Amino acid sequence: FLMIRRPPRSTHRKTLFPYTTLFRSDQKGLALRGGHHCTQALMKKWGITGTARASFYFYNDKEEVDRSLEILDHLYKRFADRN
């Protein structure tokens, strides 16, 4: 049983290009999914070009979740203003 004691975090950041997130997270060992995720009409309405999404399942442990959040926080801090 995995209990996450943090609020959910969104990878939707207006200043961080989703494909930068995908490429850089892959370099750090974090696999994310990118694209439209079957929501092209909604994303077009909101002016979003793409998203990055992490998928967790029962086999992920707390350390993997924490590491994923650390990687995403690092990427945001490093690349948010460069896109």
Image: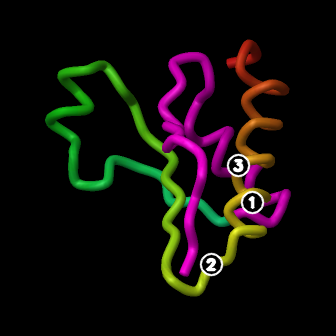
Where is 63 relative to 59, above or below? above
The image position of residue 74, as x and y in percent, is 82, 37
Label 2's element? Answer: loop
The image position of residue 46, as x and y in percent, is 25, 20
Q: Quadrant of residue 82?
A: top right
The circle on residue 60 is 2
Q: Earlier in the sequence, mark 1 or mark 3?
A: 1
Left/right placement of residue 63 relative to residue 22 reads right
Alpha-carbon distance for marks 1 and 3?
14 Å
The C terminus lies in which quarter of the figure? top right
Alpha-carbon distance for marks 3 and 2?
13 Å
Label 1's element? Answer: helix
Q: Which residues are magenta?
A: 1-30
Q: In the rendered picture of this protein, how many numbered marks are placed on residues?
A: 3
Q: Residue at x 66, y 42 (%)?
A: 21
Q: Are marks 2 and 1 in contact (CB under 8 Å)?
A: no
Mark 3 lies on residue: 69
Q: Are marks 3 and 2 in contact (CB under 8 Å)?
A: no
Q: Earlier in the sequence, mark 2 or mark 1?
A: 1
Dominant secondary structure of the residues highlighted in magenta in the image:
loop
Q: Are marks 1 and 3 in contact (CB under 8 Å)?
A: no
The image position of residue 33, as x and y in percent, is 50, 60
Mark 1 lies on residue: 26
